[in-house]
Amino acid sequence: MTQELAQDILTRAMTAGLTVTTAESCTGGMVAAAITDIAGSSNIFERGVVTYSNAAKVDLLSVRPATLEAHGAVSEEVAAEMAEGARSRAGAGLAVSVSGIAGPGGSAHKPEGRVCFGLASAAGTQTETVEFGALGRAQVRAAATRHALTLLRNALP
C-alpha cells in the first residue's frame, strides 16, 4: 500500500509542479524512504529530516524550545512547527511531519500508539493526532508511515 501511495504522490506532485519534504521522529525516515523508493522521486523530493531528539527538532527544524517544554515532543503544536520548519528549510511546496510514541511503553497521558501529524503548505498548517493503539513498535511505525503518505497524497491536487 505504501508503494501505491508514494507513486500517487509522485504523479500528483509532478503534475502540480510541487515539491514535498518530510520531518520525522518516530518513523525514523520511513516516509522519506517510501517516497524515494519510487523511480523519479528526485523530481519532487529533495530532502527529508529525521529529528529524533528534541535538540535536533530545535536545531534542524526551528521548533521552539518553549513549544517543546509546554506541550512535549508528541503534540500537535510540535508537529506543526516541525512541518513548517521542514517546508521552510527545504523550500518545498508541501511538508509532512510525524512525532509519536511507537512503543513499547508510553504513559496514561501519552499512550503507546499516539502519533501527531503536521501538514504545511502555502495555504497554512493543519495537524491531527491518531491513536493507533498498542499495536507494537513496528506496526505503529508502519501505520504512521501510511497515514503520513495519505496526508501528503490528499493534499495534492
Image: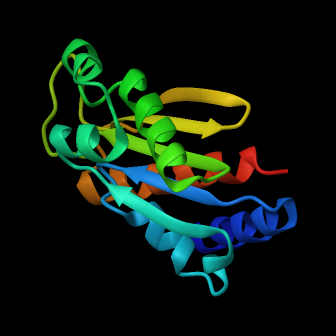
Residue drawn where x is 63% and y is 77% of the image: 41
Report x, y in % for residue 25: 30, 48
Q: Quadrant of residue 54?
A: top left
In the image, is residue 12 above or below residue 108?
below
**Colouring mode (rainbow / by chain / secondary structure / one colour):** rainbow
Which residue is outermost to the bottom? 39
Residue drawn where x is 37% and y is 51% of the image: 24
Number of labels in the image equals 0
Report x, y in % for residue 133: 34, 36
**Residue 92 appears in view:** yes
Would you say 81 lies left or right of 128 here? left
* Quarter of the N terminus within the rendering: bottom right
Q: Decide which of 70, 38 is in the foreground and name it.
A: 70
**Residue 130 appears in view:** no
Report x, y in % for residue 127: 54, 27
Which residue is outermost to the top? 70
Q: Quadrant of residue 50?
A: bottom left
Would you say 90 lies left or right of 123 here? left
Q: Decide which of 41, 98 is in the foreground and name it.
A: 41
Report x, y in % for residue 2: 57, 67
Residue drawn where x is 52% and y is 27% of the image: 128
Would you say 25 lies left or right of 86 here? left
Would you say 9 lies left or right of 139 here? right
